[in-house]
Image (cartoon, rainbow, N blue to C red):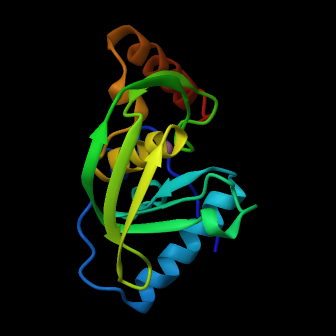
Amino acid sequence: MIRPILRLGAAHLQAPASSVAAITPEIDTLVTDMIETMYAAPGIGLAAPQIGVSLRIFVIDLSVGRDPKALFTMINPEWVERDGMQLEEEGCLSLPGFTATVPRPTHAVVRGWNRQGEEHTVEGNGLLARALQHEMDHLDGKLFVDRLRGIKRDLIVRKVRKLTRAGQW
Ligand code: NI
């Protein structure tokens, strides 16, 4: 089931998410919904807090459904490695219409459970390293705007406030 994606201003997006205790049928359904919602958007990643569920789960598929091997699920992910620094344009499904240049690692390794509850490790460079850091941030209640410096962040936040007042957010 495709679920509505929360936008900047929603409380779930600003709260650290809780660990998943066990893989249950409810968790499995949640992961299915997250994948459907990510593809429908369309996007290359989605974290559970973005659909109002404060659990440490995200899905990533850089191919947006074109390559079945590109899709993976991370439950209770932890950092193994992070290094380097890249500056690229980035967006978020919770901030439609906005992008910014965000500093991110060039190389990242994350370990967590797959949707069967088996441990797996994902290593990424470039865009995948960026996506891993972006989704890990969602689990800690952070959006890409929180990685921006003062003026850039304020500009986006102010525009969102204006849109909210106009009933367009
Ligand atoms: Ni995002």
- Viewed as shown, does residue 14 lie left or right of 44? left
Measured as percent of width and height from the top left, residue 108 is found at 36, 45
Which residue is located at x 60 percent, y 34 percent?
167
Which residue is located at x 35 percent, y 86 percent?
23
Measured as percent of width and height from the top left, residue 75 is found at 35, 69
**In the image, is residue 47 above or below residue 134?**
below
Measured as percent of width and height from the top left, residue 28 is found at 47, 83
Quarter of the image for residue 56 reads bottom left
Q: Quadrant of the C terminus?
A: top right
Which residue is located at x 64 percent, y 30 percent?
97
**In the image, is residue 59 above or below residue 62?**
below
Q: Residue furthest right?
A: 66
Q: Residue furthest bottom?
A: 25
Q: Residue furthest top?
A: 151
Quarter of the image for residue 64 reads bottom right
Q: Nearer the viewer, residue 76 or 51?
A: 76
Q: Quadrant of the N terminus?
A: bottom right
Measured as percent of width and height from the top left, residue 142 is found at 33, 40
- Viewed as shown, does residue 119 lie left or right of 48? left
- Viewed as shown, does residue 165 lie left or right of 114? right
Which residue is located at x 33 percent, y 57 percent?
110
**In the image, is residue 43 above or below residue 166?**
below
Q: Nearer the viewer, residue 157 or 67?
A: 67
Is residue 55 something one can see in this rendering? no
Count of numbered tags: 0
